[in-house]
Amino acid sequence: MHSVRVTASSAAYDVLIGKGVIDTIGQAARDRLGRPARRAFLVVDSGLPASWINRAAASIAAAGYQVSQAALTATESHKSLSALQGLLSEMAAGKLERFEPVFALGGGIVGDVAGFAAASYRRGVPVIQCPTTLLAMVDASVGGKTGVNLEASGTLKKNLVGAFHQPLLVVADVESLHSLPDRHFRAGLAECIKHGMISAGDGALKADPGLFTWTASNLRAILARDPAVLTELITRNVRVKAAVVGTDEREELPSEQGGRALLNLGHTFGHAIETIPHLSPDGTPEHAPLHHGEAVAVGLVAAAHCSLGAGLCNDGLVKQVEAAVAAAGLPTRLAGLPPSDRLLELMSHDKKVVGGKLRVVLPVGEKPGTCSVVESSDATAIMHGWNSVRA
Ligand SMILES: NC(=O)c1ccc[n+]([C@@H]2O[C@H](COP(=O)([O-])OP(=O)(O)OC[C@H]3O[C@@H](n4cnc5c(N)ncnc54)[C@H](O)[C@@H]3O)[C@@H](O)[C@H]2O)c1
């Protein structure tokens, strides 16, 4: 088992990574709680195999907790205030008290909704994140962002309502990834490639300068879901996320100092296309819409071309990014993209607009590893980025 310590300004906690760690979640939580607790509330992703849910519940019960359980359907439309209310009502019906823990077993959707329920129930009860997707293991479960989507003015606004609530503990069992559908697994790799593209930067962000190259050279074993290689992949990615969260827990650092804003690499582009219903990773209507990781993958390629257009990186960097994204089975080009001025408008709806200037994170230099946050009102390089990812 590997362990990474996350030290944020509001809390410090461990991320336990390995094969079989799910069987320790109950006792590991009890050891860290520091107070007597009789009950625990387990929120599970309804898409998980029953055997996995039973294993988690058994571990919690074996540590002496009386467990009540609720299931969530992991779709963006279920990541809602009504799902939150459902959980809160069940927590109240189960008489969960102030220091009794919530366990979130599932992907990023379950982690976000159950985490927000834990943040708001009795003004905050402990949450143990038990991610079961690659994306949630390397990204969503670490850092304390929780929340739900909100329907407003006829559109679904992603993650508009939420809270920062750092977990008591994160437990990532690589064995759970065996049942994860291939498309979701590959989508998680987009975040790993992204981490490799920011982890050779300055200061605290010099978390793992070799990560991009290591990921590219171990891709075959990663795609075969080799438990030892997955444990290393997740550990190294969590270290990068922990380094960023440790310097800037609430994304408050000025953009020129980087901080948590760097995690938005590929996302300013990706968010603009993620909700366009007809876009599909391979151009076929049955695979539309894009998954978050697929949109980020195209976003990483667009950001690299944008940087090239702005004269901030060389052609070799762009080629390496494209090769890594393609080798992971993720899209580098998309058919049916809207006109670039429409994409620019969609980007400007994103929260990364500051004082009318668009803020984008771009890879810089000669090889992937270092990024800069660039604020610009000149759209030429951004248009170049978009035009480069048209199929
Ligand atoms: N809080 C954060 O910091 C943060 C960061 C990134 C993403 N997110 C959020 O995470 C969400 C996406 O999460 P995700 O990509 O982890 O997936 P997900 O929660 O959307 O789940 C994807 C699918 O995989 C299924 N699934 C999950 N684990 C499985 C397993 N082990 N075996 C079989 N099926 C399994 C689910 O039932 C679902 O059908 C988005 O809502 C996004 O906004 C949050």
Image (cartoon, rainbow, N blue to C red):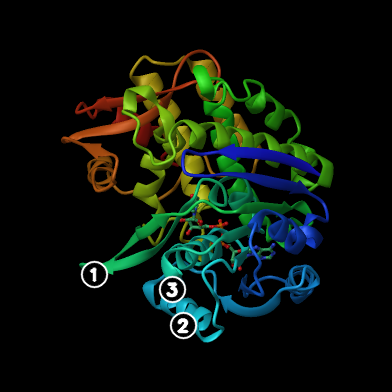
Name the residue located 81 percent from the left edge and 71 percent from the top edge: 62
Instruction: State the image quarter where residue 123 is shown.
Output: bottom left
Please tell me whether mark 3 sits on a helix, a strand or a loop.
helix
Of tags 2 and 1, which is closer to the observer?
A: 2
In the displayed structure, does residue 270 sit left or right of residue 155? Answer: right
Question: Type of residue at label 2?
Answer: Ser
Rendered image: mark on residue 154: 1
Residue labelled 3 has its Cβ within 8 Å of some atom of ligand 1: no
The residue that label 2 is drawn on is: 89
Q: Earlier in the sequence, mark 1 or mark 3?
A: 3
Do the residues under discs 1 and 3 have CB atoms within 8 angstroms? no
Do the residues under discs 2 and 1 have CB atoms within 8 angstroms? no
Name the residue located 16 percent from the left edge and 35 percent from the top edge: 355
> Who is closer to the viewer here, 264 or 382?
264
Of tags 2 and 3, which is closer to the observer?
A: 2
Please tell me whether residue 68 is drawn above or below residue 379 in the rendered image. Answer: below
Name the quadrant of the N terminus: top right
> Who is closer to the viewer here, 351 or 130?
130
Looking at the image, the residue that sits furthest to the bottom is: 93
Please tell me whether residue 28 is drawn above or below residue 248 in the rendered image. Answer: below
The residue that label 3 is drawn on is: 84
